[in-house]
Image (spheres, grey):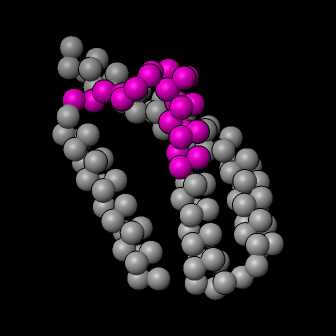
Amino acid sequence: MAIGYLLVMGYLAVGLRMQRRQAVRPARVVGRRGWPGLVRRVVGTAVGGYVLLMVVVVGYYQGVSHLDGDLVTSAFTGAATLVGISLPVFFVVSWVVVRRRYGKAASRRAGRRL
């Protein structure tokens, strides 16, 4: 359990460090812009989260508790259903955040021109 905790905290620390580095650099979107870039980022985040969750579930049920495969199958289908339900909400919220960020950046540039 301690190893799992350390792995999660390490992953979060790496993410925070990457986010701080990007804040120092000039504002620029990595990868594609527009709808294709947003869809790619949202789907990539959802798939990455699902895969990480399944690694934890399988690791726990097979490595620690030694339970049967029916519970793992249920975890796979239940998590897939959860991703299917939450992905549209996550997409809309991500779109709103990106739009607000670009709106603030545009207003700052317009303010500097004056």
At x 78%, y 67%, the residue is 74
Identify the residue at horizontal 20%, vertical 20% (top origin): 112
Left or right of 81, for residue 39: left
| Image side of residue 66 versus residue 10, left or right | right
> Could you tell me which residue is drawn at 76 percent across and 54 percent down?
81
35 is within the stretch colored magenta: yes
- Outermost residue, bottom side: 65
Residue at screen point 61% across, 62% down: 54
Q: Which quarter of the figure has residue 73?
A: bottom right
Vertical arrangement, residue 101 with respect to residue 106, above or below: below
Q: Say which quadrant the C terminus sits in.
A: top left
65 in magenta: no
Which of these two is toward me, 92 or 12? Answer: 12
Q: Quadrant of residue 27?
A: top left
Residue 69 image point, x, y percent: 76, 72
Q: Would you place residue 69 above or below residue 65 in this image?
A: above
Q: Is residue 96 visible?
A: no
Q: Nearer the viewer, residue 84 or 52?
A: 52
Q: Which residues are magenta?
A: 26-48
Image check: 28 left or right of 75? left
Horizontal and vertical percent for residue 40? Answer: 53, 32
Residue 40 in sight here: yes
Exactly how many numbered labels are in the figure? 0
- Residue 92's spot in the image, x, y percent? 62, 37
**Residue 74 in the image: above or below residue 68:** above
Q: Main secondary structure of the magenta part?
A: helix
